[in-house]
């Protein structure tokens, strides 16, 4: 079923993102579009790397300092080094991780690469972010929704073009996890103070030449995804600077934050 959806004639975000962070799981069309976007907006590679490093810091923080043992990673993308389950299970081997994506090439790689510890569990479900009910139902086969869950939504809501629909997805998912759960989120922005104005023409090119279509949002719009949750320090910041070892890390136009459900 998934194979029927695989189209290597059009650049796809999961593969282009893989190309930007130095991976090998991409095609010539992905490289071509990726190079063009990088030419228009050179910061894109820095964004891709910063987003990946943010994931590592967030998972380590939640597993080590907050004792989180369950992670729901929505929009996982192609596996690379130090995936969510590898970081979490290195700290706590009994951690349970469920990945969610609906790109067939991601599915093919996930089934072979995303193997975890015998003490914990690592699963992958083929589902669309636009259908949170299906995600929750299928994830419940691995995760215990009576215990805290870290919901990871890194660089995924930017593919939900309707803003209210994106907010509704977050509300539906967070409504089904108990108090003490977390929302971990990154999202590209067009805010000028973090250099985001260059994203606008680059995203226009992307939307005309690749899939799926993407959008950037303001910091205020992104902050609203956390309504009803308590943002942890340092709040919503450039993901490159969230709890970074280097306090002077160069900001990128991709906001990141972690919040807890009270």
Image (spheres, helix red, strand yellow):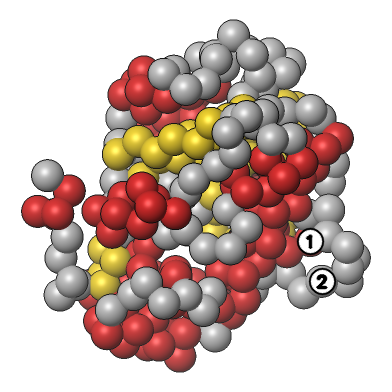
- Tell me the residue at 56%/69% (across/down): 48
- Helix, strand or loop at label 1? It is helix
- Tell me the residue at 47%/22% (across/down): 142
Q: Which residue is mark 1?
A: 241
Label drawn at residue 183: none
Looking at the image, the residue that sits furthest to the bottom is: 39
Instruction: Give the quarter of the figure containing the C terminus.
Output: top right
Choose the circle earlier in sequence order: 1 or 2. Answer: 1
Left or right: where does residue 67 sit relative to residue 113? right
Left or right: where does residue 46 sit relative to residue 153? right
Q: Nearer the viewer, residue 47 or 15?
A: 15
- Helix, strand or loop at label 2? It is loop
Q: Quadrant of residue 64?
A: top right
Q: Which residue is mark 2?
A: 249
- Tell me the residue at 43%/47% (across/down): 75
- Tell me the residue at 55%/42% (across/down): 116
For label 2, the crowd category at 10 Å Cα-Cα, with few meaning under 14, some 14 to 19 and many 20 or more, is some
Q: Nearer the viewer, residue 93 or 133?
A: 93
Residue 249, horizontal then vertical, whole percent: 82, 71
Residue 23, horizontal then vertical, whole percent: 47, 75
Could you tell me if the residues under marks 1 and 2 are in contact, i.e. CB atoms within 8 Å? Answer: yes
């Amino acid at each position: 079923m998934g194979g029927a959806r695989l189209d290597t004639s059009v650049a796809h975000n999961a593969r282009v993102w893989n190309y930007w962070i130095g991976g090998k799981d991409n095609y010539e069309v992905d490289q071509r579009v990726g190079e063009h976007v990088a030419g228009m907006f050179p910061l894109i590679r820095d964004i891709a790397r910063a987003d990946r490093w943010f994931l590592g810091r967030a998972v380590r923080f939640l597993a080590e300092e907050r004792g989180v043992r369950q992670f729901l990673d929505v929009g996982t993308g192609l596996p690379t080094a130090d995936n969510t389950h590898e970081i979490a299970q290195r700290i706590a081997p009994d951690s349970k991780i469920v990945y969610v994506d609906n790109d067939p090439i991601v599915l093919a790689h996930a089934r072979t690469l995303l193997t975890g510890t015998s003490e914990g569990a690592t699963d992958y479900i083929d589902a669309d972010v636009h259908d949170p009910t299906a995600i929750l139902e299928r994830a419940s086969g691995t995760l215990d929704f009576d215990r805290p869950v870290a919901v990871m939504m890194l660089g995924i809501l930017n593919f939900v073009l309707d803003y209210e629909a994106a907010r509704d997805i977050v509300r539906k998912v967070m409504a089904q996890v108990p108090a003490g759960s977390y929302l971990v989120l990154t999202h590209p922005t067009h805010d000028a103070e973090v250099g985001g104005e260059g994203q606008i023409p680059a995203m226009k090119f992307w939307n005309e030449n690749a899939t799926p279509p993407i959008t950037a949002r303001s910091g205020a719009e992104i902050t609203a995804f956390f309504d009803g949750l308590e943002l942890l320090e340092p709040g919503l910041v450039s993901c490159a600077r969230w709890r970074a070892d280097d306090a002077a890390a160069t900001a990128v136009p991709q906001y990141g934050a972690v919040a807890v459900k009270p």
